[in-house]
Amino acid sequence: MYRFEKLRVFSHAMDLVEEIYRITKLLPKEERFALIDQIRRSVISVVLNIAEGAGGLGDKEYQSFLRISLKSLYETVAGLMIARRLYKIDVSVALEKCDVIGKELNALINSFKK
């Protein structure tokens, strides 16, 4: 088992990826190379930066990857808000997951400051 697999935030981020893929399948085909791709890339970035940061790097570099993950999470949230506004898609479950992940990432980032 990899170090990042033991992190609750990684597991929650993987759940979010599944939810985002479910939601983006509901978007119109004309969004395939725009909003769909952007939201999927941003949520994948959340997961990948958590994993990459946990790869045995020093604390400072790990924090940097976690911050990138958090920024990608914010991008995902903004994309969900666009989907909700333009296409009236219910994204409440995904936004709740984003809120939890954001808190977990912030807590993990702040744990290095002690």
Image (cartoon, rainbow, N blue to C red):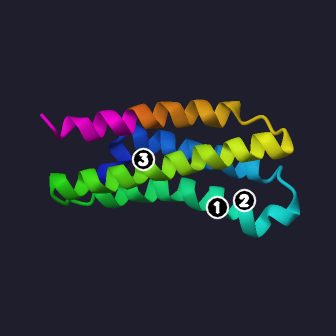
Q: Pick whichever of labels 1 and 3 is earlier in the sequence.
A: 1
Q: Secondary structure at mark 2?
A: helix
Q: Quadrant of residue 95?
A: top right
Q: Where does residue 56 sit, x and y in percent of width and height?
A: 20, 59
How many neighbours does mark 1 have within 10 angstroms: few (below 14), some (14-19), or many (20 or more)? some
Q: Are marks 1 and 2 in contact (CB under 8 Å)?
A: yes
Residue shown at the point (66%, 49%) measured from the top left: 79
Mark 3, residue position: 70
Q: Decide whether residue 111 is among the magenta residues.
A: yes
How many neighbours does mark 3 have within 10 angstroms: few (below 14), some (14-19), or many (20 or more)? many
Residue shown at the point (41%, 31%) measured from the top left: 103
How many neighbours does mark 2 have within 10 angstroms: few (below 14), some (14-19), or many (20 or more)? some
Amino acid carrying label 2: it is Leu
Residue 13 seen from this side: yes
Q: Is residue 88 above or below residue 76?
A: above
Q: Pick whichever of labels 3 and 2 is earlier in the sequence.
A: 2
Q: Which residues are magenta?
A: 104-114
Mark 1, residue position: 38
Q: CA distance from mark 3 to mark 2?
A: 19 Å
Q: Quadrant of residue 65?
A: bottom left
Q: Is residue 37 above or below residue 46?
A: below
Residue 1 seen from this side: no
Q: Classify residue 83 as left or right of residue 55.
A: right
Q: Classify residue 81 as left or right of residue 99.
A: right
Q: CA distance from mark 1 to mark 2?
A: 5 Å
Q: Nearer the viewer, residue 87 or 17?
A: 87
Q: Where does residue 89 sit, x and y in percent of width and height?
A: 81, 39
Q: Are marks 3 and 2 in contact (CB under 8 Å)?
A: no
Q: Where does residue 81 sit, x and y in percent of width and height?
A: 69, 41
Amino acid carrying label 1: it is Gln
Mark 2, residue position: 35
